[in-house]
Image (cartoon, rainbow, N blue to C red):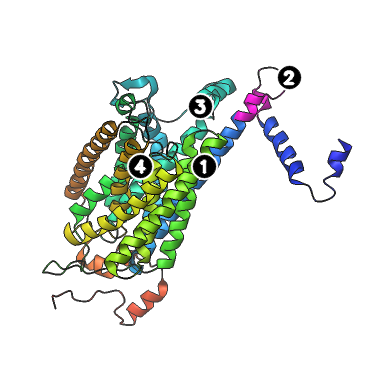
């Protein structure tokens, strides 16, 4: 012991540091031991699992900064405050509604009415006593850890919708939609698989949410964008396309890297343990798919546009990440490369289709990234993973699509009738920062406008 302590007088070795950290970890939950003999191996495993799940929770949380950054960067400066306000509000709405009703809708346990719906009651409450806390999830992690990890997922679906309806939807209407969508629609849909519902019984597989999170949000985004219609000036009177570039590609690029970083928690945490082999595999498949998505988007966009497009490769990385999310734990590295590469091709083709042919205005490409590539990733499980059936995956995709489209359509139409969903033409031209908030993210722009400049207005969009 004397020699061990003496080692800290000099620069401690890695082995020494590891020994100390291991001893601290072993002692953390010694109070839970049922005998006075001290901590057991099971206590250490429990602690490791719980700590990794909390680290993954932090990583998923930082994804919301990524979503805020990429949405802000790919839209115009005059709407920055509005977009940031929405993204800050969404995380608050997601956590609170998940605590009030969402967690017990998604995981109803014995309170399920068949395999389609269940509700274990309002609020969250710890199992009785320390023994109940340790026994939760077969001793894997605590009840509280499970709740907070899943709560971070909940707000993501509404964040996806935010990007597709950006720059023209009323803030109040968006917040009402997000509250109901996250609290009820997302959670009931999630219970069908993650809560042990009918799709789980059928054998449908979605490891971390290509469909349950991304496609559900993507369907909501598609319906919202269709009902709202395109932004002013997006299309000419003859139907020609006018690109509306975002104001900060550096901010969008930072958002992409934050999302990729957070995805290690999104997918890695979905292992639901600190299993070193499985987490390592998930990190590898996640990384390879994201990298392949960039290459796929780069190649196709360069061929189509004759120039390399940064916004396309940013979405290409996200496309690969969404695509691998359904099967990150069951794919080989080479399969993940193929999935990511195809996702990169798909996102470029999809953006072109929705922009040019379907005339669905999606400022950040959220529908293409999350819906199209979410569907692809879910079906890819049935193609590349031998233990899963393609038709079962297809049934799951179809079921989630029908349910989410119907719910989103009802929500948007009811809100449109009661509150209205689109800002006035004047507010849209001025920018939602001033129209909705009376403040701007970039004060210099306001000074130019007050001096008689044209920064806050848009030109006349007449056919040439």
Q: Is 11 above or below relative to 207?
A: below
Highlighted magenta segment, given as a residue range: 29-45
Estimate the spatial distance between the alpha carbons at disc 4 and disc 3, rounded to whole Å.
30 Å
- Mark 4 and mark 3 lie on one chain; the one further toward the N terminus is 3
Estimate the spatial distance between the alpha carbons at disc 1 and disc 4, rounded to whole Å.
18 Å
The residue identified by callout 1 is 56
Estimate the spatial distance between the alpha carbons at disc 1 and disc 3, rounded to whole Å.
21 Å
Q: Residue furthest left?
A: 238
Give the number of the disc on residue 126.
3
Estimate the spatial distance between the alpha carbons at disc 2 and disc 4, rounded to whole Å.
45 Å
- Mark 1 and mark 3 lie on one chain; the one further toward the N terminus is 1
Give the number of the disc on residue 210.
4
Residue drawn at x 24%, y 60% is 352
Mark 1 or 3, which is nearer the eye? 1
Q: Quadrant of the C terminus?
A: bottom left
Estimate the spatial distance between the alpha carbons at disc 1 and disc 2, rounded to whole Å.
32 Å
């Amino acid at each position: 012991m004397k020699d061990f302590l003496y080692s800290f007088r000099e620069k401690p070795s890695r082995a020494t540091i590891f020994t100390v950290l291991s001893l601290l970890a072993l002692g953390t939950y010694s109070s839970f031991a049922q005998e006075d003999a001290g901590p057991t191996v099971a206590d250490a495993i429990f602690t490791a699992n719980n700590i990794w799940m909390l680290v993954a929770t932090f990583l998923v949380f930082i994804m919301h900064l990524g979503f805020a950054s990429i949405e802000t960067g790919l839209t115009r400066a005059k709407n920055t405050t509005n977009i940031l306000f929405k993204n800050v509000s969404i995380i608050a709405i997601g956590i609170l509604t998940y605590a009030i009703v969402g967690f017990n809708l998604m995981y109803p346990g014995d309170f399920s009415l068949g395999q389609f719906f269940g509700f274990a009651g309002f609020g969250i409450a710890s199992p009785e006593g320390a023994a109940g806390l340790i026994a939760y999830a077969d001793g894997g992690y605590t009840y509280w850890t499970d709740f907070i990890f899943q709560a971070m997922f909940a707000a993501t679906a509404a964040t996806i919708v935010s990007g597709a309806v950006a720059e023209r939807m009323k803030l109040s209407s968006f917040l009402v939609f997000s509250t109901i969508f996250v609290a009820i629609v997302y959670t009931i849909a999630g219970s069908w698989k993650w809560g042990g519902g009918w799709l789980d019984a059928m054998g449908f597989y979605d490891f971390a949410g290509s469909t349950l999170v991304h496609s559900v949000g993507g369907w909501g985004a598609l319906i919202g964008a269709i009902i709202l219609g395109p932004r002013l000036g997006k299309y000419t009177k003859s139907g020609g396309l006018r690109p509306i570039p975002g104001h900060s590609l550096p901010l969008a690029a930072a958002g992409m890297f934050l999302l990729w970083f957070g995805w290690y928690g999104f997918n890695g945490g979905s292992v639901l343990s600190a299993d070193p082999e499985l987490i390592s595999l998930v990190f590898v498949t996640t990384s390879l798919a994201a990298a392949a998505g960039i290459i796929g988007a780069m190649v196709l966009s360069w061929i189509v546009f004759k120039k390399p497009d940064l916004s396309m490769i940013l979405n290409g990385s996200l496309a690969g990440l969404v695509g691998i999310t359904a099967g990150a734990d069951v794919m080989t590295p080479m399969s993940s490369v193929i999935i990511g590469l195809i996702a990169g091709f798909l996102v470029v083709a999809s953006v072109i289709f929705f922009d040019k042919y379907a005339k669905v205005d999606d400022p950040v490409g959220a529908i293409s990234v999350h819906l199209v590539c979410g569907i692809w990733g879910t079906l890819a499980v049935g193609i590349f993973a031998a233990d899963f059936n393609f038709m079962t995956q297809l049934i799951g995709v179809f079921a989630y699509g029908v349910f989410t489209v119907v719910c989103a359509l009802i929500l948007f139409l009811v809100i449109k009738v009661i509150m209205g969903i689109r800002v006035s033409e004047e507010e849209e031209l001025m920018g939602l920062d001033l129209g909705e908030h009376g403040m701007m993210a970039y004060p210099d722009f306001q000074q130019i406008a007050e001096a008689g400049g044209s920064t806050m207005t848009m030109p006349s969009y007449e056919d040439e």
